[in-house]
Image: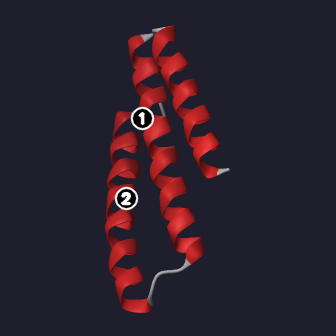
């Protein structure tokens, strides 16, 4: 995934499409608690993977530190 930029772009685009569609589906069928947590979780997972991708590209450990702090902040927010 990190070396294949086409796959990264395809998966990123699919995530954006799915993220747009879940709002439409929620407005039609009604919001659910699972839907809220699932949307929150997937959005944060994609943000974390993006920071890791940038870290890998830059070969800089500070970006990994940022990714770890971001993960800790999100985990403390959920509990």
Disc 1 marks which residue?
50
Who's the residue at 41% across and 81% down the image?
26
Badge 2: few (under 14), some or many (20 or more) residues near its Cα, within 10 Å? few
Who's the residue at 46% across and 45% down the image?
46
Disc number lying in front (2 or 1):
1
Where residue 57 appears, as percent x and y from the top left, is 40, 18
Where residue 62 appears, as percent x and y from the top left, is 48, 11
Is residue 40 placed above or below 28 in the rendered structure? above
Residue 68 vs residue 31: left or right? right
Who's the residue at 37% across and 58% down the image?
14
Where residue 72 appears, as percent x and y from the top left, is 61, 33
Who's the residue at 54% across and 17% down the image?
65
Give residue 14's mark. 2
SS type, badge 2: helix
Q: What scheme was used to colour the molecule?
A: secondary structure
Nearer to the camera, 65 or 19: 65
Q: Is residue 47 visible?
A: yes
Is residue 55 placed above or below 32 in the rendered structure? above
Nearer to the camera, 46 or 68: 68
Q: CA distance from mark 2 to mark 1?
A: 14 Å
Q: Is residue 3 visible?
A: no
């Amino acid at each position: 995934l990190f070396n294949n930029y086409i796959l990264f772009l395809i998966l990123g685009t699919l995530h954006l499409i799915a993220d747009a569609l879940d709002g439409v589906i929620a407005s039609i069928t009604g919001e659910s608690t699972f839907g809220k947590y699932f949307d929150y979780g997937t959005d944060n997972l994609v943000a974390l993977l993006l920071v890791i991708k940038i870290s890998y590209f830059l070969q800089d450990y500070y970006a990994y530190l940022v990714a770890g702090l971001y993960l800790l902040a999100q985990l403390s927010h959920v509990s």
